[in-house]
Image: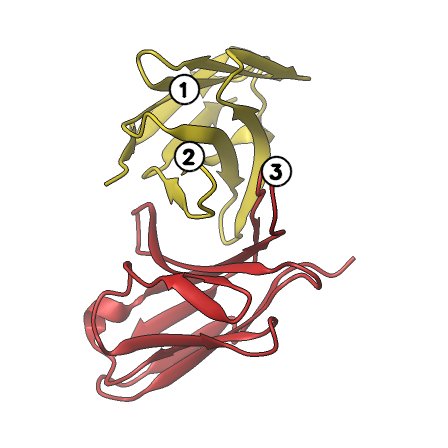
Chain colours: A red, B yellow
């Protein structure tokens, strides 16, 4: 079946430009997460959605970062005025809502390079 | 806030057992997870354990949980070269769906 998909898979942008990263979660998954993984680093939590609302935005590094989710499905992570330190792999994951183990299913990631 | 720590690197010989360790700080953790990340890929759930358990076995994988010491381990029996990857420990607290990940342990399997 279809898993979590992300686009683009790779993005090279110039410093100062805006970028949009897209995540398509597994159908029916109400929870959606964005993480950032810098080279050789662990996963840095960015934001979490339950449905279309974001109960926890605590991980967004600065006000240049924003995210939205529409229709309880697709999510877009936007980075404005990109900086070189934004270069990383951005991972999206989704999980079922309700009670349970909340296994997260990850997409393959978008590798962002800011030159 | 929550914190999850792992050693960064582990090297083992093919056929030996691997033990990857993890410590966490949140005493209200309900689920603890092990994820595997192969090069260039996203994370894949290997196994998880509920906090009222102290052991879970799944084929070559054994998870041990010491809730008192907030210590989690993953043992891989008969480690194969295909097990080479980064292994992430993660924990979730209470009813909240946020999951906190460790920094990952890179497992190198020497043929």
Report the residue marked by disc 1.
B72
Residue B56 position, x and y percent, is 59, 15
Judging from the image, mark 3 belongs to the subunit labelled: A
State yes or no: discs 3 and 2 in contact (Cβ < 8 Å).
Answer: no
**In the visual, does A90 lie left or right of B26?**
right
Q: Nearer the viewer, mark 3 or mark 2?
A: 3
Report the residue marked by disc 3.
A100
**Figure quadrant of residue A71:** bottom right
Residue at image position (23%, 85%) is A81
Q: CA distance from mark 1 to mark 3?
A: 20 Å
Q: CA distance from mark 3 to mark 2?
A: 13 Å
Count every numbered label the image shows and give the total.
3
Q: Is residue B62 above or below residue B102?
A: above
In terms of sequence position, does the residue under pointer 1 or pointer 2 come before the other?
A: 1
Question: Are dots 3 and 2 on a single chain?
Answer: no
Residue at image position (42%, 66%) is A54
Q: Is residue B98 above or below residue B73?
A: below
The quadrant of the image that shows the C terminus of chain A is: bottom left
State yes or no: discs 1 and 3 in contact (Cβ < 8 Å).
Answer: no
Report the residue marked by disc 2.
B91
Relative depth, front residue between B17 and B73: B73
Residue at image position (37%, 42%) is B100
Q: Secondary structure at mark 3?
A: loop
Q: Is residue B48 above or below residue A85?
A: above
Residue A23 position, x and y percent, is 54, 70
Q: Residue furthest bottom?
A: A17
């Amino acid at each position: 079946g279809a898993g979590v998909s992300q686009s683009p898979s790779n993005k090279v942008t110039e410093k100062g430009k805006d970028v949009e990263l897209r995540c398509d979660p597994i159908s029916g998954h109400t929870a959606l997460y964005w993480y950032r993984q810098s080279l050789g680093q662990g996963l840095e939590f960015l934001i979490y959605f339950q449905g279309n609302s974001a109960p926890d935005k605590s991980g967004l590094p600065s006000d240049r970062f924003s995210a939205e989710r529409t229709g309880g499905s697709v999510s877009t992570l936007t980075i404005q005025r990109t900086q070189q330190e934004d270069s990383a792999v951005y991972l999206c994951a989704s999980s079922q809502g309700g009670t349970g183990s909340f296994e997260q299913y990850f997409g393959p990631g978008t590798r962002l390079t800011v030159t | 806030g929550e914190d999850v720590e792992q050693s960064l690197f582990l090297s083992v010989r093919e056929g030996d057992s691997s033990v990857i360790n993890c410590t966490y700080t949140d005493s209200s953790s309900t689920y603890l997870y092990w994820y595997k990340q192969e090069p260039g890929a996203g994370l894949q759930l290997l196994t998880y354990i509920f906090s009222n358990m102290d052991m879970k076995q799944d084929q070559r994988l054994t998870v041990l949980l010491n809730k008192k010491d907030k210590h989690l381990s993953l043992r891989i029996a008969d480690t194969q070269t295909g097990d080479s990857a980064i292994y992430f420990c993660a924990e979730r607290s209470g009813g909240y769906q946020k999951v906190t990940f460790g920094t990952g342990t890179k497992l190198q399997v020497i043929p």
